[in-house]
Image (cartoon, rainbow, N blue to C red):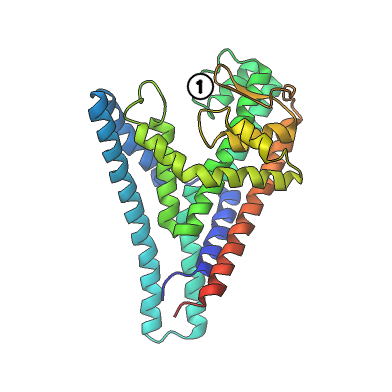
Amino acid sequence: MSLTPLDLIVAAWVAAWVDRRWGEPPLWLHPVVAMGRYLGALGPWLCARSPVVAGLGGALAWCVGAAACVALAAALSEALAACLRWAGAHGASTWVMGVLTALAGATLGLLLKPLMAWRMLHDEVAAVESALAESLDAGRARLQRLVSRDVSQLDEAQVRESALESLAENLNDSVVAPLFWFALGGLPGAALYRFANTADAMWGYRGRYEWAGKWAAHADDLLSWLPARLTALLLCLAARRGPGLAALRHEAAQTPSPNGGWPMGAMAHLLGVRLSKPGVYVLNAAGGAPQAAHTPRALAWCDAAVRLAWWCLTLSCLIAWAASGPAK
């Protein structure tokens, strides 16, 4: 007996419940923190090398890190499946097997939870709006927790724009894409995506990591391609309207990333606001500056999109289970 699509459903809903109830695990237990330490330790050494060595070294380091994450996730998943096989081989009753299967799914959900993060994203974006109500400086300081850009010169509208952009883009990176790859590849799939996205966040910038981060940036672009477009669709479904495919394609073409413009462009059009990064892109240029009321509206749509994502995963797993039949 191996883990089935029904186990994936249990795991996804357990992960969702744990996320909403408790948020992130402690740093010492967080796998993404471990990924970041690995990447952070190698990054400075790679940046000091020649472009060729940095490029090859960055690709090799990415592959080693990704392989380690996938192997560990696969080993944990196999350990759960092995426990079920052992119980079945030793004559466990149907009732006992049902309980053990539910426990295996719940354990898988606990392992999945750190690979996605909706509550933290929601709370951080809401905190930016609350800080802006106090002062512009407080808003800038809170925004710096969300973005890597210099925020010291941003005005109130630009702080709000940045928070809304981060909300839309990270809805994909932190929720939809990990769930998508979990549905396709189980815990190893989610771990692979989380490592790829973390590597892109740390290494995938032009400038210092121009060469070392090329592989990481392209890998994240590939793994995020379909989930980013699904995220835009989920936002439109959550808002019960949309700007249309042509408009989304136009906005997506404005950003350097082949993926980020899809959820951000959808958010800009749905809110009817202009979202921009100075000197880089402008989305929905005809829109007005975002106001305080736009943030809770965007958060509500994203929350609905998250729920839709979980139901889509549930439906897809049920279809897969029905097509293959219960595991023998």
Image position of 283 with respect to 307: above or below: above
- In the picture of the structure, the residue carrying the numbered disc 1 is 149
Visible in this render: residue 124?
Answer: no
Name the spot of residue 311 as percent of width and height, x first.
64, 58
- Left or right of residue 313: residue 63: left
Q: Quadrant of residue 254?
A: top right
Residue drawn at (71%, 23%), measured in percent from left and top?
133
Q: Residue furthest top?
A: 153
Residue drawn at (40%, 82%), measured in percent from left and top?
88
Residue drawn at (44%, 45%), measured in percent from left and top?
194
Visible in this render: residue 232?
Answer: yes
Q: Which quadrant: the C terminus?
A: bottom left
Query: Callout 1: few (<14), some (14-19), or many (20+) C-alpha neighbours within 10 Å?
Result: few
Q: How many marks?
A: 1
Disc 1 is placed on an element classified as: loop
Name the spot of residue 324 as percent of width and height, x first.
50, 74
Q: Quadrant of residue 168?
A: top right
| Residue type (three-letter) at the residue carrying disc 1 | Arg
Name the spot of residue 152 as percent of width and height, x first.
55, 14
Name the spot of residue 59 as percent of width and height, x first.
30, 38
Along the viewing direction, whichever of 102 and 159 lies nearer the viewer? 159
Q: Residue furthest front?
A: 246
Residue drawn at (38%, 77%), measured in percent from left and top?
85
